Image (tube, rainbow, N blue to C red):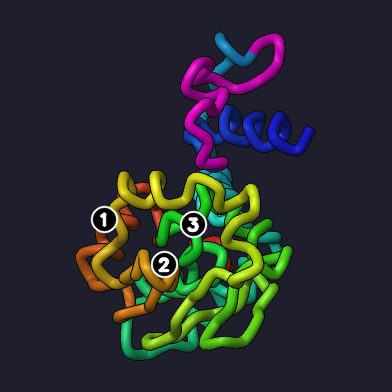
Amino acid sequence: MRVVTTCKACRRLGVSVCGREKCAVRRKPYPPGIHGKSFRRGLSEYGTQLREKQKIRLTYGLRERQFQNLVTSAFAQKSISSPDAVLRLLEMRLDNVTYRLGLAPTRAAARQLVNHGHLFINSRRVNIPSYRVNVGDEIKIRPQSVQKGAFANLEITLKKHSVPSWLAFDMQRMTGKVVSYPPAETLEELGKGFTISAVIEYYSR
């Protein structure tokens, strides 16, 4: 039921935010409902800001309060621009890093792995998806979990997976590492999928 609801959101926003290969928006690129295929409504400035906020929030799987707090934290960072700070904070969440390392096919699946305690951070078990990793942190699969269903075909999957330049993964140790913050070019590429300025304006009202 949750998948169906998420894909309805994908269709409503016009973009896949669930991360699933078989997302409904790929087959039905129009809003859900009887009149979805023919109904088109122009958005106000506020409506555009709200849509962009929903796109990025649902893509990364945050609740409204979580996302609001994250944007507030981004405003407080002076070393980089607010849009880049938003993306960096999203990318440095443990559930997202788990997904980027290729340990899960979607961010939702990555959150489940973290919630179930399958991962260690620097030899300490962490089960909080929103946990913010730091440069130098090691993410290791719990030894007792390696043979479990969630990781059954992991070696085959990882051979096909391209790990971002700011992360690294050691197959023998089944351990990932945060090598650096996401570089500027990575943030720029990520930003192409969202209008971050609209999100900043939404929370600046």
The one nearer the camera, 8 or 126, is 126
| Mark 2 surroundings within 10 Å by alpha-carbon count, few (fewer than 14), some (14 through 19), many (20 or more) | many
Q: Quadrant of the C terminus?
A: bottom right
Which mark identifies residue 189? Answer: 1
What kind of residue is marked 3?
A: Leu
Which residue is at 62% across, 66% downward?
A: 67
> Gap between marks 1 and 3, in whole Å?
22 Å
Question: Residue 77, percent across and down?
Answer: 43, 87
| Mark 1 surroundings within 10 Å by alpha-carbon count, few (fewer than 14), some (14 through 19), many (20 or more) | few
19 over 196 or under it: above or below: above
Mark 2, residue position: 87
Question: Residue 115, percent across and down?
Answer: 71, 65
> Gap between marks 3 and 2, in whole Å?
21 Å
Q: Is residue 81 left or right of residue 97?
A: left
Q: Secondary structure at mark 2?
A: helix
| Mark 3 surroundings within 10 Å by alpha-carbon count, few (fewer than 14), some (14 through 19), many (20 or more) | many
Which residue is at 62% across, 72% downward?
A: 130
SS majority, magenta? loop
Magenta stretch bounds: 18-35
- Of callouts 2 and 1, which one flags the residue occurring earlier in the amino acid sequence? 2
What kind of residue is marked 2?
A: Leu
Mark 3, residue position: 103
28 over 175 or under it: above or below: above
- Of callouts 3 and 2, which one flags the residue occurring earlier in the amino acid sequence? 2
Visible residue check, residue 200: no
Q: Is residue 190 magenta?
A: no
Question: Residue 61, percent across and down?
Answer: 61, 55
